[in-house]
Amino acid sequence: MPLIILCYSTIAIIFQHVSSASLPNNETVPAVIVFGDSIVDPGNNNYIETLIKCNFPPYGRDFVGGNNPTGRFSNGLVPSDIIDQLDMFKEYIMKIKEAFDRNIATTIVSKSIYIVCIGSDDIANTYAQTPFRRAQYDIQSYTDFMASEASKFLQELYGIGARRIGVFSIPVIGCVPSQRTIGGGILRSCSDSSNQGAILFNSKLSSQMVTLQTKLPDARFVYLDSYTPFLDMLQNPTKYGFEETDKGCCGTGNIEVGILCNRYSIDTCSNSSNYLFWDSYHPTEKTYNVLSSLVLDNKINDFF
Ligand SMILES: *[C@@H]1O[C@H](CO)[C@@H](O)[C@H](O)[C@H]1NC(C)=O
Ligand SMILES: *[C@@H]1O[C@H](CO)[C@@H](O)[C@H](O)[C@H]1NC(C)=O
């Protein structure tokens, strides 16, 4: 889930990058299109559906203009099938084609940047916290399955006409506060098994993308490593202006998320500016701004 949020802030960051005049060969990017999480396991909606209900205080507390609990985490993020998202996207392309000349429409589709965020829920929730997947798969075969589903999805995007495709890796998912509480023992260390799952999936995703790049050379498949920078932020928080890394601002910070993080939560911090995490699962706005910049800074040229 952090990646969903990361993805949304990423839109703004990418726009900053692409609108600054530094693009190679005067390139233009007509749109940034983001596909959210739960791609690989669309059956895993229940937990997320409770999480996305956050249109109440203190969510939105620090929005520009003051309190504004818009339900931000759910904004456009109905974690239903990715197929729905692809279908919606196909409709969107049809509309572009109706509105513009066919060639222009094709150019818009091919020159837009597509950002895909996948896998965090699958490792942190579906695999780590429910027994069903573990009964069917070990972590090797589960991450194989996830990576091959991801590859299928990227090829579908290509089939629709996308040519500039970036995929975020899973961050250090075992170190979010709720994973520490649930899987980190009495000391609330990072959940090693979730982090190992993330590392395994990331390496498989990365090699799938190398394969796709070879097979489809007219596209750009850009692997966006968020694991390494996020780990650095956790290990060297002061470097980035953070202090609190193992609990969220909301409530005790150890477990509250979604409906458990509300105006009655006790001990919610009064100023989250030093917090890496807003609740026990989602980063603060500052975190994802820092992280998105770290991830994208050296990668933006790879899209062209
Ligand atoms: C970029 O645009 C500028 C201004 O229109 C032009 O002078 C320059 O030659 C262009 N560069 C390339 C690589 O097309
Ligand atoms: C939170 O703390 C930071 C750093 O001390 C400060 O700059 C900021 O104004 C504070 N924000 C609020 C809402 O008090």
Image (cartoon, rainbow, N blue to C red):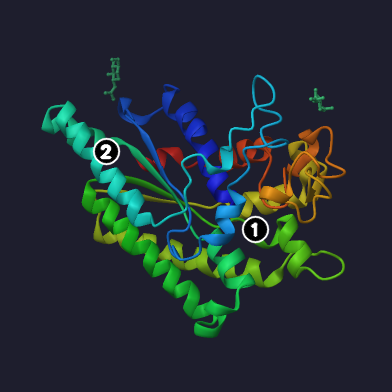
User: Taking the image as drawn, is residue 297 in sight?
Assistant: no
Which residue is label 1 attached to?
172
Q: Residue at x 84, y 33 (%)?
A: 270
Disc 2 element: helix
Q: Residue at x 41, y 65 (%)?
A: 207
**10 Å crowding of disc 1: few (<14), some (14-19), many (20+):** many
Give the image location of residue 55, x and y in percent: 62, 38
Of circles 2 and 1, the one toward us is 2
Q: Residue at x 56, y 59 (%)?
A: 120
Report which quarter residue 194 is drawn in.
bottom right
Marks 2 and 1 sit apart, C-alpha to C-alpha, by: 34 Å
Q: Give the camera-side residue of 149 and 90.
A: 90
Q: Is residue 61 above or below residue 209?
A: above
Q: Is residue 85 above or below residue 9?
A: below
Q: Is mark 2 within 8 Å of ligand 1?
A: no
Amino acid at dot 1: Val
Q: Left or right of 116: which side holds 252? A: right
Q: How many marks?
A: 2
**10 Å crowding of disc 2: few (<14), some (14-19), many (20+):** few
**Which label sits on residue 92?**
2
Disc 1 element: loop
Q: Give the camera-side residue of 234 and 127.
A: 127
Report which quarter residue 289 is drawn in.
top right
Give the image location of residue 301, x and y in percent: 41, 38
Amino acid at dot 2: Tyr
Q: Left or right of 247: which side holds 41? A: left
Quarter of the image where the C terminus is located: top left
Q: Quadrant of ligand 2?
A: top right
Q: CB atoms at circles 2 and 1 under 8 Å apart?
A: no
User: Taking the image as drawn, is residue 245 in sight?
Assistant: yes
